Image (cartoon, grey):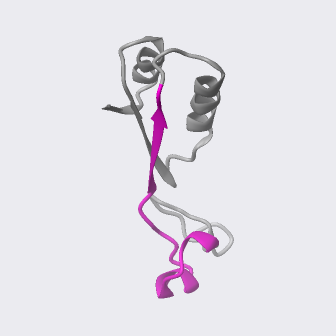
Amino acid sequence: MDGGRVRGPWPIEPEFSRSEDARQGLRFAMPYKLLFLDQFGTIGGGQRVLLDALEALDPYKFTPTVALHGKRDFREELKSSGRTLLNL
């Protein structure tokens, strides 16, 4: 415990949980699943922003998946960083 806060595999901020357990200080939850869609297979400005956003996500709070088509450099960049991909 850290200053009365319970730590665990999925610590979350109070606004993420509304359960009775959360009100009693037991703040655990499964990460939110996020799906990002991209229509291009090449890296441009929007894809760079998406890569930065994926890096900034807290893995304890969010599980991102990227859906895109084509087998270009953006897909390879996502694969090399270990991201979950879906084919469109």
The residue lying furthest to the right in this view is: 3
List x then y, in percent, for residue 85.
36, 32
Q: Residue at x 66, y 22 (%)?
A: 45
- Whether 39 is drawn above or below 28: the answer is above
Vertical order, 29 against 62 (above or below): below
Query: Percent from the top left, x then y, of residue 35?
Result: 44, 45
Quadrant where the C terminus lies?
top left
Question: Up-down: is 33 above or below 48?
Answer: below
Q: Position of residue 63 (x, y in %)?
A: 44, 47
Q: Nearer the viewer, residue 3 or 66?
A: 66
* Horizontal arrangement in the rendering, residue 48 relative to residue 36 (left or right): right
Magenta span of residues: 15-39
What's the residue at 58%, 25% (across, down)?
Answer: 47
Which residue is nearer to you in this view: 77 or 10?
Answer: 77
Quarter-wise, where is residue 75 in the image? top left
Q: Tell me where residue 49 sits by quadrant.
A: top right
In the rendered image, the quadrant that contains the N terminus is bottom right
Q: Residue furthest left?
A: 87
Q: Is residue 59 above or below residue 50?
A: below
